[in-house]
Every structure is written in structure tokens, then in C-alpha cells.
């Protein structure tokens, strides 16, 4: 099966490098295809050369059976609308992590609205630079149709990129989306100098919120305990390679953050807070991160509010 990666950002470029021996096509958005084809490098992943086997273009190829959509979560709905007529009969594998702020839907639900497509998501603990270097990485591939999941699993796995499959698309996509919210909180704690113990507490309580919301929305709890939930949470909340963590650090230090860097957790926090409100769920960490990202509270005020909540059982 032929594969195309949509989006020549860091993660899309890394996937193209990892799958280069399949003759993959990398589709650069926003007119950058010619420059990337000429230099064999993406500015979003410096120091990584694209193998000659990777075809770089700015046009969606008509013969690719599998499209890996390395598109930011908030841009996915628009991309699908713009290309709907070209997607029939293809497997569309979302690689972004978030909840659409307008529809409050995850990536596979958005893809399911496109007739004749197979919706799937590839998610889990991974940094683009490490995938591009061929370092061992394990991810979750979620597709509601297990037969299709098996096909995709074999088509996209490599000796260094090990994919585990599940039919729980809701759990997989919410694990990847909600852990970014917790990562912002953890980055803010460390940026403000509040210590490793506070970060551990936020990771734990944040994970409880992830499970609470995800299971209410139909996810299986064991999915949240796997790579796409707990695994990704650990990675993202403990490394400054994570953009969401770095964004939180900047908030904690009251420093500006580069607006050109995509921070999926900020809009996801707002979307998750809305979902929780609609379902009568109390998610204090999520609500606090949403307020923090919108400038509605400071890190000091946020920590005071969380620490002064009524005492309760764990």
C-alpha cells in the first residue's frame, strides 16, 4: 500500500524519514514544497535530511492508499473540507493530538464525516527528532475496524517504530489530546519553581481527570492506561522537548512564547473544559489550565485555588 504524509512539520517529516523505504510521499502545505524538495530539509526539523526515496510535493497524490495527516488538530477540519472530493476510498490516519474547538470532536470523528474514508489515529509517546533518528518508539494505532487496523499496522510499522493496535479510537485520541493539557500545567509548575513534588501531584490528578472525561465520552479505561494515555503523559510532562511543556514553562516564568509554535494543549484545554461543563464533570486541573491559557488567572492564583479546594478521598 502506498503512503503519503500530509504536512512537512516536525512530526510529518519524521514519519516520512521513518517510512522512506516504502517510497513515501511528503506533501508540504503552505507552499514550502519546492524549498524542502531542493534542500531535502524541513525548517521544522533542522539537521534531518530527507532520504532520496522520499518524494516531496505540494500536491495531494492521487494514488496514495494511506494518508498520514500530520496536520494540527485545529486545522484538520478545514483541511478535510478543502480536500473532501479527493479522499474517497482512502485510509486517513490522524497524527495530530487535540479536540476541535468548534465542534468538540476528536480527529477520527471529524474524518468519519468524510464519505468513503477509513478513519484512524496514530498517537502515543514520541518526539519527532527521535523518530527521525531511528530510535525505538512504540505508538498506538486506533481504528474502529480491526481488519483495517491490522492492515494499517503492518503497512506503517518499521523495525524501530512498533505499532500496537486498538479499536478504541475515542480513548486513543482523548489520551493524546488531554495529556497536553496536563503537560501545560506541569510546565507551569516547573517554570514557577514549585518543584518536582508539585509536578508529580499534577500528573497524577491530571491523569485522573483524563480518565474521568474520556470514559464519560465512551473510552475504555485500559486505553488510557496504555501508550496513548499514560505513556504519552509521562513523556510530555517531563521533557522540554514537548512544546506544550515549554509553553507551560513560559507561563510559569511570565515569559512570552513564540506564537509560530503550535501548542495543541491550549485550545484543547478550552474544549475539554466545555465538554466537562456540558456533562457535569468537575475537572479542576483542566479548568485551571484553560483559564491560564486565556489569561484569566496567574500561575500563583491557579496554584492557590487548586491547593485550597476542599479535602477529599483520593
Image (tube, grey):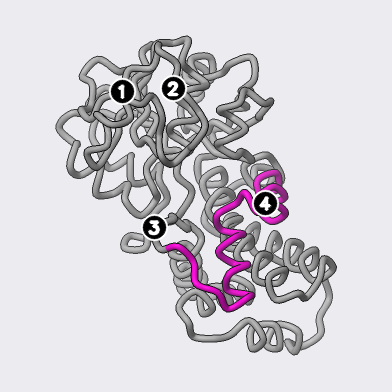
Q: Earlier in the sequence, mark 3 or mark 4?
A: 4
Question: Which disc, if any, is residue 260?
Answer: 3
> At x 15% / y 32%, what residue is drawn?
85
Q: Earlier in the sequence, mark 3 or mark 1?
A: 1
Q: Residues within 10 Å of mark 1 (few under 14, many from 20)?
A: many
Question: Which disc, if any, is residue 56?
Answer: 1
Q: Earlier in the sequence, mark 4 or mark 2?
A: 2
Which mark is in front, 1 or 4? 1
Distance (Cα) linking label 3 and label 2? 23 Å
Distance (Cα) linking label 3 and label 1? 23 Å
Distance (Cα) linking label 1 and label 4? 32 Å
Viewer-side residue, 208 vs 11: 11
Residue 221, compared with residue 27, is above or below; it is: below
Instruction: Tell me where residue 34 appears, x and y as whole percent.
Output: 24, 29
Viewer-side residue, 195 vs 99: 195
Residue 21, compared with residue 270, is above or below; it is: above
125 with respect to 95 (left or right): right
- For mark 2, what is the residue? 50
Q: Quick check: marks 2 and 1 in contact, CB under 8 Å?
A: yes
Amino acid at each position: 500500500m502506498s503512503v503519503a504524509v500530509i504536512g512537512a512539520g516536525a512530526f510529518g517529516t519524521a514519519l516520512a524519514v521513518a517510512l522512506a523505504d516504502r517510497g513515501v510521499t511528503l506533501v508540504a502545505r503552505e507552499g514550502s514544497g519546492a524549498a524542502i524538495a531542493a534542500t531535502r530539509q524541513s525548517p521544522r526539523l533542522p539537521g534531518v535530511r530527507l532520504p532520496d526515496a522520499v518524494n516531496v510535493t505540494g500536491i495531494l497524490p492521487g494514488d496514495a492508499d494511506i494518508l498520514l495527516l500530520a496536520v494540527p488538530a485545529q486545522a484538520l477540519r478545514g483541511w478535510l473540507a478543502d480536500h473532501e472530493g479527493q479522499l474517497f476510498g482512502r485510509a486517513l490516519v490522524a497524527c495530530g493530538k487535540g479536540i476541535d474547538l468548534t465542534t468538540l470532536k476528536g480527529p477520527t470523528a471529524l474524518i468519519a464525516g468524510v464519505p468513503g474514508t477509513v478513519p484512524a489515529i496514530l498517537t502515543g509517546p514520541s518526539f519527532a527528532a527521535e523518530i527521525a533518528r531511528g530510535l525505538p518508539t512504540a505508538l498506538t494505532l486506533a481504528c474502529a475496524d480491526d481488519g483495517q487496523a491490522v492492515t494499517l499496522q503492518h503497512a506503517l510499522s518499521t523495525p524501530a517504530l512498533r505499532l500496537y493496535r486498538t479499536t478504541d479510537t475515542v480513548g486513543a485520541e482523548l489520551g493524546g489530546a488531554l495529556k497536553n493539557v496536563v503537560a501545560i500545567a506541569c510546565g507551569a509548575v516547573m517554570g514557577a519553581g514549585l518543584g518536582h513534588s508539585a509536578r508529580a501531584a499534577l500528573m497524577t490528578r491530571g491523569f485522573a481527570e483524563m480518565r474521568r472525561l474520556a470514559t464519560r465520552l465512551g473510552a475504555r479505561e485500559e486505553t488510557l492506561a496504555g501508550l496513548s494515555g499514560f505513556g504519552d503523559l509521562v513523556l510530555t510532562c517531563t521533557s522540554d522537548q514537548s512544546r506544550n511543556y515549554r509553553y507551560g514553562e513560559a507561563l510559569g516564568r511570565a515569559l512570552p512564547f513564540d506564537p509560530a509554535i503550535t501548542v495543541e494543549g491550549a485550545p484543547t484545554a478550552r474544549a475539554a473544559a466545555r465538554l466537562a461543563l456540558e456533562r457535569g464533570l468537575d475537572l479542576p486541573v483542566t479548568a485551571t489550565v484553560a483559564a491560564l491559557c486565556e489569561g484569566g488567572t496567574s500561575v500563583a492564583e491557579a496554584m492557590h485555588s487548586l491547593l485550597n479546594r476542599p479535602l477529599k478521598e483520593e
